[in-house]
């Protein structure tokens, strides 16, 4: 019996991370720098952002090239631990 994790993703792949946080001039840069710790090839042009409907939050989508589940898990953990981030999808 194997205890291998199953995933629907095929690695390597480009994975869109959706990150929500409070409106702040450094939010997009903070997300980029956090992602770069685990995916150093991520560039500013891989990010798109938009305000929430009421303007209280900023949503960014980062297209991250990932090579494995552990790398993706590390990015999620780093982002969810960041003080400016509210939600990561």
Image: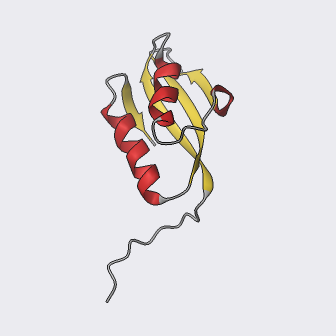
Judge whether 2 appears above or below 75 on screen: below
Front one among 60 and 54: 60
Residue 49, quarter of the rendered image: top right
Residue furthest to the right: 45
Residue 69: percent from the left, percent from the top?
Answer: 45, 59
Asked if residue 52 can be seen in this view, the reply is: no
Seen from the viewer's position, the closer of residues 39 and 85 is 39
* Quadrant housing the N terminus: bottom left
Above or below: residue 64 compared with residue 84: below
Name the residue located 53 percent from the left edge and 42 percent from the top edge.
39
Q: Is residue 88 visible?
A: yes
Picture coordinates of residue 74 (x, y %)?
A: 39, 47
Q: Is residue 18 left or right of residue 12?
A: left
In this rendering, position of residue 16 left or right of residue 38: right
Q: Is residue 1 above or below residue 88?
A: below
Outermost residue, top side: 25
Q: Nearer the viewer, residue 40 or 24?
A: 40
Q: Residue at x 37, y 22 (%)?
A: 84
Q: Residue 72: image x %, image y %? A: 46, 50
* Residue at (52, 37) in percent of width and height: 18
Tell me if 9 is positioned left or right of 83 in this view.
Answer: right
Q: Is residue 74 left or right of residue 55?
A: left
Q: Position of residue 33 (x, y in %)?
A: 48, 27
């Amino acid at each position: 019996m194997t205890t291998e994790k199953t995933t629907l993703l095929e690695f390597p792949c480009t994975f869109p991370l959706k990150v929500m946080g409070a409106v702040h001039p450094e939010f997009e840069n903070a997300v980029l720098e956090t992602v770069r710790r685990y995916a150093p090839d991520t560039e500013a042009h891989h990010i798109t952002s938009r305000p929430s409907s009421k303007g209280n939050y900023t949503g960014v989508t980062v297209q991250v090239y990932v090579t494995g589940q552990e790398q993706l898990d590390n990015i999620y953990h780093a982002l969810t631990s960041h003080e400016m981030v509210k939600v990561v999808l």
